[in-house]
């Protein structure tokens, strides 16, 4: 397991908050709702 000092970056958009569409353009990331970080309900490991 890798440890990061910052919050977990969303694996889908890599922290950008949006994803590039193959057809062109971009869309708000469905994995993080555009926040750029994983949403795990205040879950501390
Ligand atoms: Zn995301």
Image (cartoon, rainbow, N blue to C red):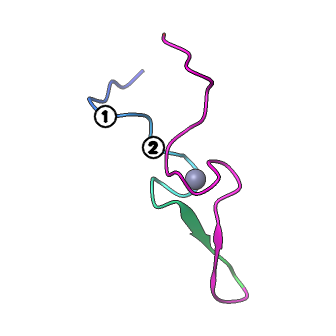
Question: Dot 2, crowdedness within 10 Å: few (<14), some or many (≥20)?
Answer: some
Residue positioned most to the left: 5
| 37 shown above or below 42 | below
Q: Secondary structure at mark 1?
A: loop
Q: CA distance from mark 1 to mark 2?
A: 8 Å
Residue 36 is inside the magenta segment: yes
Residue positioned most to the top: 45
Q: Secondary structure at mark 2?
A: loop
Query: Which of the two residues, 29 or 2, is positioned nearer the viewer here?
Result: 29
Residue 37 image offset from top left, x and y in percent: 50, 43
Q: Which contiguous range is marked in magenta? A: 23-44
Could you tell me which residue is drawn at 71 percent across and 55 percent down? 30
Query: Which of the two residues, 17 or 4, is positioned nearer the viewer here?
Result: 17
Could you tell me which residue is drawn at 64 percent across and 66 percent down? 28
| 30 shown above or below 11 | below
Which residue has dot 1 on it?
A: 6
The answer to whether 31 appears left or right of 38 in the picture is: right
Residue 41 is inside the magenta segment: yes
| 4 shown above or below 43 | below
Residue 32 image offset from top left, x and y in percent: 61, 48
> For residue 30, which numbered disc appears in the image?
none
In the figure, residue 21 lies in which quadrant?
A: bottom right
Residue 15 image offset from top left, x and y in percent: 45, 53
Question: Dot 1, crowdedness within 10 Å: few (<14), some or many (≥20)?
Answer: few
In the figure, residue 1 lies in which quadrant?
A: top left
Q: Main SS type for the magenta part?
A: loop
Q: Are marks 1 and 2 in contact (CB under 8 Å)?
A: yes
Could you tell me which residue is drawn at 44 percent across and 35 percent down? 8
Could you tell me which residue is drawn at 64 percent across and 60 percent down? 29
Which residue has dot 2 on it?
A: 9
């Amino acid at each position: 397991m890798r440890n990061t000092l910052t919050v977990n970056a969303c694996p889908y958009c890599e922290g950008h908050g949006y994803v590039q569409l193959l057809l062109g353009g971009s869309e708000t990331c469905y994995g993080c709702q555009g926040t750029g970080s994983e949403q795990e309900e205040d879950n501390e490991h």
